[in-house]
Structures are given as C-alpha cells and as structure tokens.
Amino acid sequence: MKKILIIWEGLNSCSLLINCLAKSNNYCVDLTYTKASVPFRDVEKMFPDINKLRLVNSLDQVNEFNLIKDYDLVITTGWKSKNINKLLRLRKIKNKECINVFAIDNKIATDIFLNTDIRFNHTLLRQIFGALYYRLILRRYIDYCFVPGNTSKNLMKLFGHEPHKIFVGYYGAYEKIYQKNIEEIPKENRFIFVGQLIKRKGISLLLDSFRRYLNKGGSWDLLIIGGDYKSFRKIELKTGSKLKKIKYLPFMQPENISKEMLKSKAFILPSLQDNWGTVLCEAANAGCFLISSEQSGSTSDLIKNGINGFTFSSKLKKSNEVLEQLMTKTETLSKNKSFKSRLKISKDIAFTYNSLSYKLAVEAMLIK
C-alpha cells in the first residue's frame, strides 16, 4: 500500500476531491491542513476515509523530518513555505525514489499595470523572481506539478517544468454535491454570482452591468451569494444598485450553494483577477450557462464561447456595457429550445474535473 501525504493550506471545498483517492484500498492517505479564511463546516465528517487528519495553525508547524520522510508521495499547495520546501529537499537527498509534488493554481500575470494605475504589477514582479527561484533551486527536487487547468500549466512551463510532468486534475467540483440531474430541477430566469464581495471579484462591475441590463428592458433576476449583509449594503450604496430584482444571501455552505446554482439558468463570474475560479466549474456542473471574464483562469477550460457561455475582458473601459449585452443575449438565447443543450454541454465539460480525475492523476505520478 502506497503512503500519501497531502498538505493543503487554506482547506476549501475543492479538497473533497481527494476522497476517491482515500477510499481506494491501494493507498493510505493522510491530510494536514490549515483552515481557509471562509471554512466549510464539519471538515472531519467530510473525509471518512482519510487515515490521519491533522489541523495546524500554519505550515511552519510541519517542521519535523520524521513527519514527512516515510511517504511515497507528498503533495503540497504551492511553495511559499520555506520550511516545507526544506523538508521536501531532504526527502530527495535521503531517498531519490520518493515523489514530491507542488499543487499550483496560479496563472501568468499578463498585465504590467493595474488598470489605470501607473503602479508596477507586483504579481508580475513576483513571478519573474519566482521563475528564477524555481528554475535554479526548486526544480531539482520537485517531480511533478499538479494544476487545475491550462493557465496554470502554461505558468509552470514558463517556470521551466517539463510539460509531460505537469498533470491536470487538482481542482474541480465534488460530484456528490454539484453533479445532480439537471433535467429534474426547473430552472428560474435568473443570473447567479457566488464569491467574495471584493474588488478583485468584479462585484461592482456586475452590479453596474445588471442595472444597465434592467434599464435596457431585461427581465431576469440576479442572485448574489457571499460575504455578509453589511459589506453588500456598502457596495449597493456605492454603486447605486439597490434594485428589487437583486436578491442577496450571505456566505453559504457548498450544499446550499449547489441548490441555488441548480435553480439558476446562468452564472456570472466577472473577476478582474482570478487564478482558476473553481466556482465556475461548480456552476457548470450544476448545468448553468456561463458568462465569465477572461481574467479568470478556468474560463478557457470551461467555456466554449457562444456555445455553453460567453467570455469577455473585464479590463475593457466599457466592460460594463459588454457584460450588459451578454446578459441580454443570454436571456434571448434562453427562449430557444436549444438552450437546454447548452446547459448540458456545460455539465459535460465540467464532468472531468472531479474526484476520479484527481485519483487518476495521482496514480500516474506513482508509476515509475
């Protein structure tokens, strides 16, 4: 039986994908994790087949070589922890047959400037130094990179990792929560957004575009899920978007979010910047038509533009007008009998981003 350790910083609902791997009789899987800023409840109950579940306050607590040396494979999220990087290097020195894996969801920073600011993009600067650090040091003792999709794969190729050792399957929508029979659930004429109520997620852009959409004769509702009432009211007042057609719900657990996605015809992700954007995968699994900015990493993987959704750039000066037009076009398309086929395509595309894919990718890493 192969021994696997997964070190997950900021444990989120995507981590449920490891359950298929843990359930296999061929593997003994341990999970060490830190809590996410917005944690999902009953974590211990969500991983019935994990051998050892360990909560730490920070990755600095994983500092003893004895805790990590005997595993056949170790997967850790990113390489920010110098402490864990040191342990992975020692593993390779002591045993060249052991396997070390970085799980990465970042993408290439393409903007030199942040919107209209004349400030240098610090993300781009970090990636330049990160590329040098990875090529010269980390690459020597990291066997595989585990990524959610093509944007992260391209970043790791840029960093010098061999393409055939970059595996997809790191993120997705846990099928026991999100994959339901969409034919059995009637969908409402509404858009849905799920996410933090912060500038990076494009919440102001969404509200402004929806106001324009209603002024142009749009009839659908908009459901917003995330954050808290106080934060939402501030944004509402700032953007002047206090509209009867907007329904707001504060942060919810994945099971409840899934129910709302299943009842919604279209999902909107207007992010100004998003590494991958798992929520888009979750909405696709719930059979939603997708409208997403190109600035979200999962957009290119999940949306076939004009087929199961629309893509746009949130960096355009008139992005609010573009998004409003796509809302109107979506409402018009929904009246066509073929609209259900579009929703099924979303579900079919997202289907492969599941717990089985996670397991298959890890199995491939273990084969010599």
Image: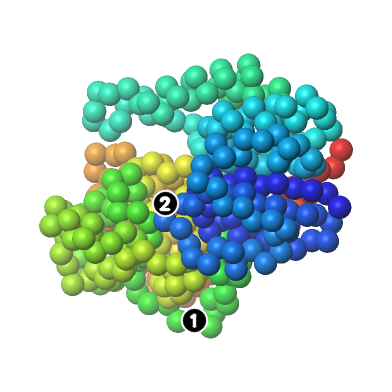
Q: Where does the image place residue 166, in percent across and percent down from the top left?
A: 68, 37
| Number of other residues with Cα within 10 Å of mark 2, as a class: few under 14, some 14 to 19, many 20 or more | few
Residue occupying the point 24% across, 43% down: 318
Above or below: residue 107 compared with residue 328? above
SS class, disc 2: loop
Q: Nearer the viewer, residue 107 or 251?
A: 251
Residue matched to label 1: 185
Q: Where does the image place residue 164, in percent across and percent down from the top left?
A: 73, 34
Q: Is residue 162 visible?
A: no
On screen, residue 215 versus residue 8, left or right, reads left
Q: Where does the image place residue 81, in percent across and percent down from the top left?
A: 55, 32
SS class, disc 1: loop
* Type of the residue with mark 1: Ile
Residue occupying the point 24% across, 68% down: 246
Q: Quadrant of the C terminus?
A: top right
C-alpha span from label 1 to label 2? 32 Å
Q: Nearer the viewer, mark 1 or mark 2?
A: 2
* Type of the residue with mark 2: Ser
Q: Nearer the viewer, residue 161 or 57?
A: 57
Q: Are marks 1 and 2 in contact (CB under 8 Å)?
A: no
| Mark linked to residue 37 | 2
Quadrant of residue 332 in the image? bottom left
Number of numbered discs present?
A: 2
Above or below: residue 132 compared with residue 43? above
| Number of other residues with Cα within 10 Å of mark 1, as a class: few under 14, some 14 to 19, many 20 or more | few
On screen, residue 272 versus residue 368, left or right, reads left
